[in-house]
């Protein structure tokens, strides 16, 4: 198994939803392939994306609150790529092409639902015409049945109850009564619904794998993102409640978050159900093995969000409105990763994990990262607070085994950071460190240059920073419930990326991030 970082390189953080396209949000279609072309032309070796699981309007379409830890969001299925499999025709998808400013998650789901129903109908009517595709679908369903059967059943029940959270279903379905589930499976249309949902998952992963292969052929590794927790209203919690801290009625007893700190007097109450680590340890962490195995099959490396939670987690009583009343509890991180490495790293090498270690990190987390060789994260936006000389995020304090980001999905863009997100003192400290900076655009340019010039083995910049965009292009504001995850590159900006490819290749070459040319 390959380590998360194999050699000095660079990458771009670009979520698939932010790509241009004609069907509501970005997808695995032509623009994704063009973006891979840009990366190769510019000398980048990593494409980092955000989680690709199914998002919901109830969670503000956050990719970190998906309803499955295994499934993919069918919004990323490319209608254009479906024509290559002769599942639909160009004439059939043409009416759904729409000029959309930004993202439209609702339309993206509606139009793909209609297009996929056409594809599914044709696939079912003439199976002999799709011999290899039909065989691949059958193999996929058999291989992924461990999670796919539960997920499609969950989706079918969701539809039956008008999209309500599983916790609001009648008790017999909420608690997975065998007789009730059996009767539902016997109802007309249930099995067909589940087969269609399985087909959508098959197409998602088929297209994801094809794009991954295209990237690999160009020397680009794809890095995914793994939230440590899952949403309460998810197929995972409904199907395996014994792994979560729930009461006898399936309600959370405690939920995840972080304690009060300098940034928030009441802390952060995320609301995810917490794990019953004792029960997970009893069966050798089978669920985690399945989850990481699936991630490593689909990505070359994964960033694991809130890595600190593998050593200790803040448990908040479920009835509390804030995080103030929470308490710290230990987690078996070392045992977990010992088991994962033994199971998933057949050559004994490091697991391809990037640890999100931002914020207040304790010594036990650092020890865990060192033991397993996991690189941590350094964010340049944090480097100019307080004493820059001693600041761990300042490049002169880096160790090589780390990933330097100009900013993450949770940060403002670098131009926006310079223009208004930071104090004048930080702005001046940055100017002294980077050299004379006279504008927001210059600040973004210098942020990218500092990341590439650092000793960090991997330097990553969001696409917004390569384009030197302002706060209007920010992806997420932590704690803000609406208006996030909506930035999308337009065709003009996409063309501007390619116009910078030669310049970026030169910088990657200058700072030793291209092995050969």
Image: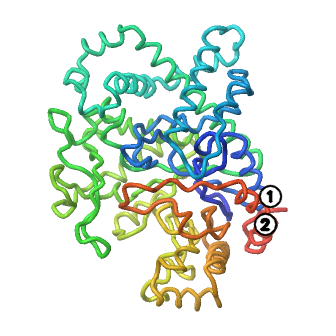
Give the residue number, with chain letter if any, for mark 2.
Answer: 505
> In the orientation shown, which residue stands out farthest toward the right?
517
The answer to whether residue 85 is left or right of residue 470 is right
Residue located at (22% from left, 61% from top) = 323
Mark 2 or mark 1, earlier in chain: 1
Percent from the top left, x then y, of residue 474? 52, 63
- At horizontal 67% and vertical 55% (from top left) the residue drawn is 490
As helix, strand or loop, the secondary structure at mark 1 comes to: helix
Q: Is residue 299 above or below residue 3?
A: above
Out of 270 and 291, give the one closest to the viewer. Answer: 270
Horizontally, residue 325 falls left or right of residue 162, namely left
Residue at position x 20%, y 42% in the image: 252
Q: Check the image and report above or below for 286 versus 375.
A: above
Asked if 176 appears above or below 377 in the picture, the reply is above
Give the vertical position of 5 relative to 263 (above or below).
Answer: above
**Do the residues bearing badges 2 and 1 touch, measured as CB atoms within 8 Å?**
yes
**Of residues 21 and 27, which is closer to you in this image?**
21
Disc 1 target residue:
41
Quarter of the image where one finds residue 269: bottom left
Residue 113, percent from left and from top? 54, 28
């Amino acid at each position: 198994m390959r380590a998360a970082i194999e050699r000095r390189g660079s990458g771009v953080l670009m979520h698939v939803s932010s790509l241009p396209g004609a069907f509501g949000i970005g997808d695995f279609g032509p623009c994704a392939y063009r973006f891979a072309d840009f990366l190769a032309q510019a000398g980048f070796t990593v494409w980092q994306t955000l989680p690709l699981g199914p998002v919901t309007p109830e969670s503000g379409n956050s990719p970190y609150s998906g309803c499955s830890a295994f499934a993919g969001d069918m919004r990323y299925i490319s209608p254009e790529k479906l024509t290559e499999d002769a599942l639909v025709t160009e004439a059939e998808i043409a009416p759904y092409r729409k000029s959309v400013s930004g993202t439209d998650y609702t339309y993206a789901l509606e139009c793909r639902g209609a297009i996929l129903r056409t594809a599914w109908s044709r696939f079912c009517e003439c199976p002999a015409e799709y011999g290899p595709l039909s065989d691949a679908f059958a193999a996929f369903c058999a291989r992924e049945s461990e999670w796919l059967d539960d997920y499609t059943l969950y989706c079918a029940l969701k539809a039956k109850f008008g999209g309500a959270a599983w916790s609001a279903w009648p008790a017999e379905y909420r608690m997975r009564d065998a007789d009730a589930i059996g009767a539902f499976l016997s109802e007309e249309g249930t099995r067909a619904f589940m087969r269609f949902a399985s087909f959508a998952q098959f197409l998602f992963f088929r297209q994801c794998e094809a794009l991954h292969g295209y990237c690999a052929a160009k020397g680009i590794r794809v890095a995914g993102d793994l939230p440590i927790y899952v949403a309460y209203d998810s197929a995972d919690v409904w199907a395996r409640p014994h792994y979560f801290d729930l009461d006898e009625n399936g309600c959370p007893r405690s939920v995840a978050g972080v304690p009060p700190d300098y940034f928030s007097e009441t802390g952060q109450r995320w609301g995810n159900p917490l794990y019953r680590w004792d029960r997970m340890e009893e069966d050798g962490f089978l669920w985690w093995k399945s989850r990481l195995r699936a991630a490593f099959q689909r990505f070359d490396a994964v960033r694991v969000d809130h890595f600190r939670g593998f050593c200790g987690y803040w448990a908040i009583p479920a009835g509390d409105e804030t995080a103030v009343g929470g308490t710290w509890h230990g987690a078996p991180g070392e045992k977990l990763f010992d088991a994962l490495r033994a199971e998933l790293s057949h050559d004994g090498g490091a697991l391809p994990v990037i640890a999100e270690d931002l914020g207040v990190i304790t010594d036990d987390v650092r020890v865990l990262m060192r033991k397993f060789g996991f690189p941590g994260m350094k964010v340049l936006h944090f480097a100019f607070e307080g004493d820059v000389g001693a600041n761990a995020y300042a490049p002169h304090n880096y160790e090589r085994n780390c990933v330097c980001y100009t900013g993450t999905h949770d940060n403002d863009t670098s131009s926006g950071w310079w223009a208004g997100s930071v104090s004048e003192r930080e702005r001046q400290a940055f100017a002294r460190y980077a050299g004379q900076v006279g504008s927001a655009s210059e600040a973004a340019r210098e942020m990218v240059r500092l990341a590439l010039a650092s000793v960090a083995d991997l330097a990553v910049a969001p696409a917004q920073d390569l384009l030197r965009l302002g706060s209007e292009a920010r992806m997420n504001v932590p704690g803000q419930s609406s208006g996030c995850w909506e930035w999308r590159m337009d065709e003009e900006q996409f063309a501007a990326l390619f116009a910078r490819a030669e310049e970026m290749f030169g910088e990657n070459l200058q700072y030793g991030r291209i092995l050969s040319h």
